[in-house]
Image (cartoon, helix red, strand yellow):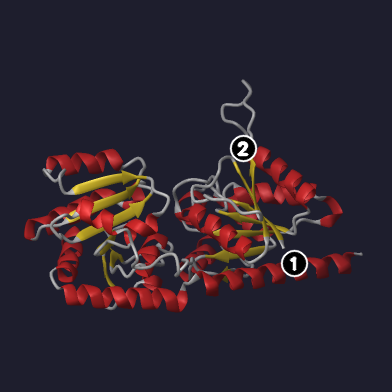
Amino acid sequence: MKIGITCYPTYGGSGVVATELGIELAARGHEIHFISYAMPMRLSGSSERIWFHEVEVATYPLFDHPPYTLALATKMSEVAEEASLDLLHVHYAIPHSVSALLARMMSGPKRLPFITTLHGTDITLVGADRSYLPITRFSIEQSDGVTAISNYLRERTIREFEVKRPIEVIPNFVNCDLYSRNGDTNNRAKWAPNGEPILMHLSNFRPVKRITDVVEIFALVREKIPAKLVMIGDGPDRGAAEYIVRKKKLSKDVFFLGKQLHVQDKLAVADLFVLPSDEESFGLAALEAMACEVPVIASNVGGIPEVIKHGVDGYLFEPRDVHTAAKYALEILTRPDRGRMMGEMARANARKKYCSNDIIPMYEAYYEKVLNSTRAAASVGK
């Protein structure tokens, strides 16, 4: 198949999943065309089956903000015609599904089908805003296919948007061969030269991720045992987290790495992954850690309980309850046998349900289903 993929090229879950999906599909013989305003973060290396098409947005004094939605729709239409795309797959509803709808209308009799994948904040934060809710609902209803990354997100979308159409649940995934315990041992020696346990966090550092809570949890752990904290990512709350680190005199124990591409090499040396978000529709970073045999402590919110089994491969706590989170962290870190057992269970559960080898065929089957439905509708209309 020839597939156009649009996502935000930033350091967030939706962009990561879309990029990894394109890479996996290309490896299986499909032709993939990424369409966005910048190269996706994880689209590194080269493949003869992957193309990138940059959306250039002109600025005019008339516009307070560049009309990206229209520019994206135009580029989608152009790429679809030039590359003979079979379908578009857009990740994150606003504004990508609206642009795809316009591109489909521009495609004429051929009718270019598009699939919308809902990732979380496009529904729980952006789409739920009353000024965006009607257009978000309309674009979902008009999509030729809709998927959600968790049962939680599917049910919330149906409930809050009163969507009548079916939504397929296709969960996030991880390449279980790439993400494993075989990390760079030099990292561990650099961060924890005396063998201290390593706590780790990975996100885009937005307020919803509560990275200041990560530092507070670590501070409580550090009161009891020697330990190190590695923070991967960047974003608006980094300054606040760094301030708390300095205030609590933890600068020698905390490493801010910024944005990283090959995160599997870092995750694989962690002893514990911390995800205290206020809201998570799935928790991709937690899954990546689990595939690397790292137990996870995370907020008991959204779709996280679908990924983490409390007391088996990690622990769940109520959002912002840093004291309970620290207690669970110490339970894992002060009992190496417990931590290793939970880490092994984490990888086993990741392999059982979320390996790319099992999830990518679900997308391929869904593509075929949408294409067959589109063809059938076209034949009836003739």
What mark, if any, has residue 371 been given in the picture? 1
Q: Residue at x 31, y 76 (%)?
A: 344
Residue 291: name its quadrant. bottom left
Counting other residues with Cα less than 10 Å from the Cα at mark 2, is it few (<14), some (14-19), or many (20 or more)? Answer: some
**Mark 2: which amino acid?**
Tyr
Q: Residue at x 35, y 67 (%)?
A: 292
Above or below residue 261? Residue 157 is below
Can you name the residue that lies furthest to the top here?
61
The residue carrying mark 2 is 68
Counting other residues with Cα less than 10 Å from the Cα at mark 1, is it few (<14), some (14-19), or many (20 or more)? Answer: some
**Mark 1: which amino acid?**
Leu
Give the side of residue 94 with respect to residue 292, left or right: right
Q: Residue at x 54, y 69 (%)?
A: 170
Residue 36: name its quadrant. top right
Q: Residue at x 43, y 76 (%)?
A: 351
> Disc 1 vs disc 2: Cβ atoms closer than 8 Å?
no
What mark, if any, has residue 234 been given in the picture? none
